[in-house]
Image: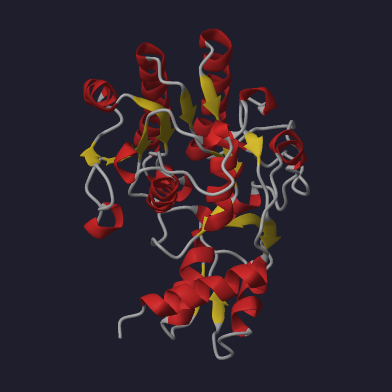
Amino acid sequence: MATTPGDTETSVLPGSVLVIGACGQLGLELVAALRQRYEPHLVVAADVRPPKNPELLAGGPFELLDVLDRTRLDKLIRQYRPKQIYHLAALLSATAEKNPLFGWQLNMDGLLIVLEAAVAHGVAQVYWPSSIAVFGPDTPRDNTPQVTIMNPNTVYGISKLAGEQWCEWYHRKHGLDVRSLRYPGLIGYKSLPGGGTTDYAVDIYHKAVAGENYECFLEEDTYLPMMYMPDALKATLDLMHAPAEQIKVRTSYNLGAMSFSPAEITASIQKHVPDFEVTYKPDGRQQIANSWPASIDDSKARQDWGWQPDFDLDKMTADMLLHLKEMQPA
């Protein structure tokens, strides 16, 4: 089985991997990272519809799957016998506020279906992403602790907080090795924004490379925790391949890398694109952002399994602009 140099025995995969929600922002890049790490045919990508660009998932098997369809999920687990399931399918913050009942159904029922199926079929590990959306307006905004007041006021945040407790319950009651990270805003160049409150920090790079100005839906001094996609992938794989005895948190780990405002990301881009301009027209997403942390205390993740980010704002900006320019049509 293919491994990368320096891998330890704990990172040798004993079977296949199923990635649910593989066509999303995180899913596309996680599938690619897993197929680099392991033999591509062992990494099964699944989503409710095919990718818009089939080449993005062409390196291994793809299966259609609505995660709310337990019968179909059972069939795929019997067919591929995965040892790991990465369950990424979800409706994100801004989108879920527009369709709250479906947001709850997809985010909550989808997780419970995956957890039940994993127990029933003896799947060794499940990964499920949480979010900074689990925090709320009464949570300390600066250096938000691992354990603190959590009173989310969005459908997305409520579903993620409930999901964290279900993950811990399935670990405690069934011995299921569920692992989770509270992602900050994720920024990557391989996919377009997907309906999240932090997605301005993706769209703004696309506009800059296209030679357009940007109208930001958040106020210029709104600080939010952010992370470049390579760091998110690194954190996810490091967590999933850490020995079980190192995983002390079975709800979800705080995860941090950098915090910045729209004004600061604009200044970082202007170092490369001096004529780039941003105007501000806050909308309903501003209220969501105001209820979230400005920075994260992720010392527990650093202590338990050695988390350490590689990218700061300027390093991310240079890399994002480079890759987006390479992707521009000739």
Horizontal side of residue 306 vs 96, given as left or right: right
* Quarter of the rendering containing residue 165: top right
Colouring scheme applied when the structure was drawn: secondary structure
Assign the N terminus to one quadrant of the image: top left
- Residue drawn 66% across the image and 67% down it: 313
Mark count: 0
Can residue 220 be seen here? The reply is no
- Whole-percent x, y for residue 212 in the image: 44, 83
- Whole-percent x, y for residue 81 in the image: 31, 24
Q: Residue furthest bottom?
A: 275
- Whole-percent x, y for residue 15 in the image: 38, 29
- Whole-percent x, y for residue 288 in the image: 57, 49
Can residue 293 be seen here? The reply is yes
Which of 105 and 45 lies nearest the eye of the viewer?
Answer: 45
223 over 128 or under it: above or below? below
* Quarter of the rendering containing residue 134: top right
* Quarter of the rendering containing residue 44: top left
Horizontal side of residue 232 vs 15, given as left or right: right
Assign the C terminus to one quadrant of the image: bottom left
- Residue drawn 46% across the image and 21% down it: 124
Which of 90 and 283 lies nearest the eye of the viewer?
Answer: 90
- Residue drawn 76% across the image and 44% down it: 297
Horizontal side of residue 306 vs 133, given as left or right: right
316 over 47 or under it: above or below? below
Which of 134 and 302 lies nearest the eye of the viewer?
Answer: 302
Horizontal side of residue 182 vs 330, given as left or right: right
- Residue drawn 28% across the image and 51% down it: 59
